[in-house]
């Protein structure tokens, strides 16, 4: 679980995102598509095409942090029972 400090907003990018993008590519999407400042300290959440991969981009004051969650193992284990 990630503790979110008070005052930090969470922005969800609508639609699909190319999950091959790293920190620079996602920061560019934040600027150009979401029209937000990637250095604001807010959290920016992106999802993959299949919906089984989520990436969160955040600036912590010293550099970008990229959190990735792969949900595909949850889908395959629940369907195999």
Image: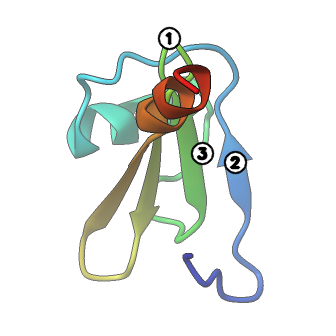
Separation of residues labelled 1 and 2 (CA atoms) = 18 Å
Query: In the picture shown, does residue 24 fall above or below 75?
Result: below
Position of residue 69 measured from the top left corner of the image (x, y, whole percent): 43, 47
Name the image quarter holding the C terminus: top right
Where does label 3 land, which residue? Answer: 36
Q: Nearer the viewer, residue 35 or 68?
A: 68
Q: Residues within 10 Å of mark 2 (few under 14, many from 20)?
A: some
Position of residue 26 measured from the top left corner of the image (x, y, whole percent): 36, 36
- Residue 53 visible in this rendered orientation of the protein: no
The nearer-to-camera label among 3 and 1 is 1
Q: Residue at coordinates 43% horizontally, 53% vertically from top-left?
A: 57
The nearer-to-camera label among 2 and 3 is 2
Give the color scheme: rainbow, by chain, secondary structure or one colour. Answer: rainbow
Name the image quarter holding the N terminus: bottom right
Lower sequence index among marks 1 and 2 = 2
Report the number of discs: 3
Q: Residue placed farthest to the front in the image?
A: 81
Where does label 1 land, which residue? Answer: 49
Q: Residue at coordinates 55% horizontally, 27% vertically from top-left?
A: 75
Where does label 2 land, which residue? Answer: 11
Q: Secondary structure at mark 3?
A: loop
Lower sequence index among marks 2 and 3 = 2
Q: Nearer the viewer, residue 73 or 30?
A: 73
Position of residue 23 measured from the top left corner of the image (x, y, whole percent): 25, 45
Q: Secondary structure at mark 1?
A: loop
Q: Residue at coordinates 61% horizontally, 35% vertically from top-left?
A: 35
Q: Residues within 10 Å of mark 1 (few under 14, many from 20)?
A: few
- Residue 68 visible in this rendered orientation of the protein: yes
Position of residue 59 measured from the top left corner of the image (x, y, whole percent): 40, 68
- Tell me whether the residue at label 2 lies in contact with that at label 3, contact meaning CB atoms closer than 8 angstroms: yes
Q: Residue at coordinates 50% horizontally, 26% vertically from top-left?
A: 52
The nearer-to-camera label among 1 and 2 is 1
């Amino acid at each position: 679980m990630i503790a979110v400090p008070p005052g930090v907003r969470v922005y969800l990018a609508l639609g699909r995102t190319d999950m091959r993008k790293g920190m620079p590519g996602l920061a560019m999407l934040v600027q150009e598509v979401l029209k937000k400042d990637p250095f604001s300290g807010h959290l920016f959440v992106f999802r993959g095409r299949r919906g089984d991969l989520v990436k969160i981009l955040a600036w912590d004051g010293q550099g970008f942090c990229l959190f990735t969650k792969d949900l595909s193992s949850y889908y395959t284990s629940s369907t195999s029972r």
